[in-house]
Amino acid sequence: MAITYYLFKTQYHSNFIADLGKADKDWILLTAITGLIPHFFRALRWKLLLQPIQKKPTSTLNAFNAIMIGYLANLALPRAGELLRCAWLSKKEEISTISLIGTVITERIIDLLVLVIMVLIGLGLYFEIILHFIKGIDFKTLILAKLYLAVALIIFLMMMAFVVFKIFTSQNKMAVKIKGFLMQLKEGLLSLKRIKSPYLFVFYTIAIWFFYILSSYCGFKMMNQTAMLNFSDALLTVIAGSFGMIAPIQGGIGAFHFMVSQCLVFLNINAGAALVYATILHAIQTLVVIVFGTLALVIGVAYQPHKKLNGTKP
């Protein structure tokens, strides 16, 4: 809320509401459609991760519904959606919830690697501008802060390694239960090593991020002030928006607006227009999640794909 208040206090202008109303409706619709497609590819990619831990193919509808329900839950409680989508699919497909959580963690690691690659591409495309921008940064203080963080992380990992070692070498009942939990989690985490179609997995991953960028690019066309921006500029806004969505805030409200609007200011877009763009884009993404998340709930409750039992349909 504090970020949102700061943004609208500093960047809000008298024509803000009017500018929202002037946004091109056709491009808004296209932005919404291209913003929905990545969720479908995410469902297809998740199915590939589930192949090694499930005997029968996962329903695409169930996987898609679980993802949309998870995103819907994130609007109310950050990160709760990741657990809810696993619990939902576990009930529908009879897969261990813990193993599903492992596959989601693997997904997040893959997406983080893709984000790092995109950041490196962004650095290459905008090197001179970024170099000029970072001249005013106090790197001594920044490096010192990172050093403290690294030391704390190493200590934490050592403590976790010690705890895991104790659990796996103990015969205590609680330790045995925790060991079983960790083994199921490991099964999901290592599913990537056993997928049957690695090239298809890579294709789906590229498709997910391509349509994220395409949706942001289509969003540029909604407004005259941003219509001249290109595809590489859209890549930069996706990077900024992704970091905004990482923040533990419901739906990334405020953090997303701040990161995306500041990215556009970085690209020489007026601060007021930048905030309008960020507001519309976030509203589109949120509306897509609300509509299709709600539909997923309704369909998920009302419809269950037929399953075969002993060679016959129930």
Image (tube, rainbow, N blue to C red):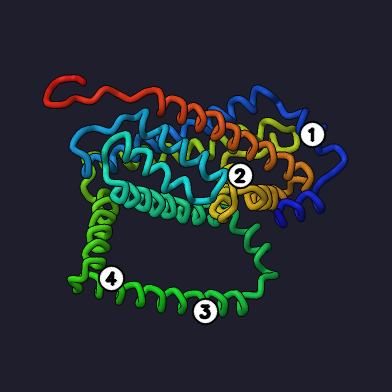
Hey, which residue is sitting farthest left in the picture?
310
Q: What label does residue 164 carry, if any? A: 4
Question: Upstream in the sequence, badge 4 or badge 2?
Answer: 4
Residue sitting at x 31%, y 47%: 97
Query: Marks 3 and 2: CB-CB under 8 Å?
Result: no
Q: What is the quadrant of residue 228 in the picture?
A: top right
Single out the mark in the foreground, 3 or 4.
Answer: 4
181 horizontally vs 219: left or right: left
> In the figure, 307 relative to 253: above or below?
above
The residue under label 1 is 19
Whole-percent x and y of residue 135?
67, 69
Hey, which residue is sitting farthest top in the picture?
313
Cα separation, mark 3 vs mark 4, equals 24 Å
Badge 2, how many Cα within 10 Å: few under 14, some, many 20+? many
Query: Quadrant of the image for the C terminus?
Result: top left
Q: What amino acid is found at the position of numbered circle 4 in the picture?
A: Val
221 horizontally vs 94: left or right: right
Whole-percent x and y of residue 148?
52, 79
Question: Upstream in the sequence, badge 3 or badge 4?
Answer: 3
Cα separation, mark 4 vs mark 2, equals 45 Å
Query: Marks 4 and 2: CB-CB under 8 Å?
Result: no
Question: Upstream in the sequence, badge 1 or badge 2?
Answer: 1
> In the figure, 164 relative to 194: above or below?
below
The residue under label 3 is 148
* SS state under label 1: helix
